[in-house]
Image (cartoon, helix red, strand yellow):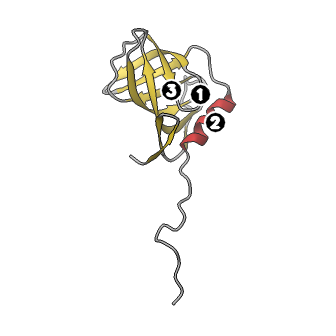
Amino acid sequence: MAGEYLGRAKLAKGQLAILPLPEGRKAERRIVNLAARLRDPGATLTEVEVVNVSTDGFMAQGEMKVEIGSYVWLKMPGLEPQNSTVVWVEDGKAGFEFVTPLHPATVELIESLSRKPVRKNLFGPLSVA
């Protein structure tokens, strides 16, 4: 997976999109694809990929051993750990709700961390014959 290192965590690169706001959702979800870590109350660290995020929560995928209703800490590069509740778990994915919702500017910062840079000289330098 392509990415760059920010601190000790590898930051995965991905395309951005805003998912539609279906009935019953409180906040827009942003597709981000970021490498992150989850820590459960027993202090077990798990590497995950945050697939989308909103002010109210996030979805992650990876080899997680979490149970609905349990609390975990989410650590993303450049941000303070966020306390979250497990809302659902299914096939290597899970949905989490932040105990304290994120500020919209924080969601924008998370989005900016996941943007792909424009690649220059993709085919090498131009040569003039």
> Disc 3 or disc 1, which is closer to the eye?
1
107 relative position to 70: left or right: right
Read off the residue under disc 2: 109
Mark 3 Cα shell of 10 Å, populated few (<14), some (14-19), many (≥20): many
**In this view of the protein, which residue sits in the foreground, 40 or 129?**
129
Mark 1 Cα shell of 10 Å, populated few (<14), some (14-19), many (≥20): few
Read off the residue under disc 1: 79
Residue drawn where x is 55% and y is 64% of the image: 120
Residue drawn where x is 54% and y is 45% of the image: 16
How far from the left and from the top, in percent, is residue 27?
60, 27
87 relative position to 22: left or right: left
Tell me the CA gap for discs 2 and 1: 9 Å
Read off the residue under disc 3: 58
Q: State if disc 1 and disc 2 touch (CB < 8 Å).
A: yes
Tell me: residue 3, above or below residue 84. below
The residue type indicated by label 1 comes to Leu
Mark 2 Cα shell of 10 Å, populated few (<14), some (14-19), many (≥20): few
Say which label, 2 or 1, has the lower sequence index. Answer: 1
Give SS at disc 3: strand
The residue type indicated by label 2 comes to Leu
How far from the left and from the top, in percent, is residue 65?
33, 18
How far from the left and from the top, in percent, is residue 41?
43, 9
Tell me the CA gap for discs 3 and 1: 14 Å
Splitting the image into 4 quarters, where does residue 67 fall?
top left
